[in-house]
Amino acid sequence: MKMKAKERKAYKDFQDRVAMPGKPRKLTEEEVKKLKKEGRI
C-alpha cells in the first residue's frame, strides 16, 4: 500500500514522537534552526 504525502508526514511525525527520549534535553541553537528550516517547529 502506497502512502499519500499527508500520511507520510503524519507517520514521520509519529516516529519522531515515539523516538523522543523520556527526559527531554535542551536543544542547541543550531538544532533549533535546522528544525525550523524543516518546518517541524
Image (spheres, grey):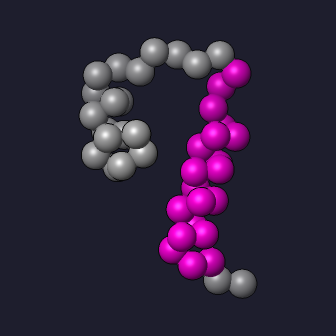
Q: Quadrant of residue 33?
A: top left
Residue at point 58%, 55% (across, down):
12
Q: Magenta span: helix, strand or loop, mainly?
A: helix
Residue numbers of the magenta segment: 3-22
Residue at point 58%, 19% (across, down):
24
Residue 38 appears at what percent x and percent y? 34, 49
The answer to whether residue 41 is above or below residue 23 is: below
Residue 2 appears at what percent x and percent y? 64, 83
| Quadrant that contains the C terminus | top left
| Quadrant that contains the N terminus | bottom right
Decide whether residue 21 is among the magenta residues: yes
Decide whether residue 4 is among the magenta residues: yes
Identity of the residue furthest to the bottom in this view:
1
Residue 30 appears at what percent x and percent y? 28, 27
The answer to whether residue 13 is above or below residue 22 is: below
Q: Quadrant of residue 19?
A: top right
The answer to whether residue 9 is above or below residue 5 is: above
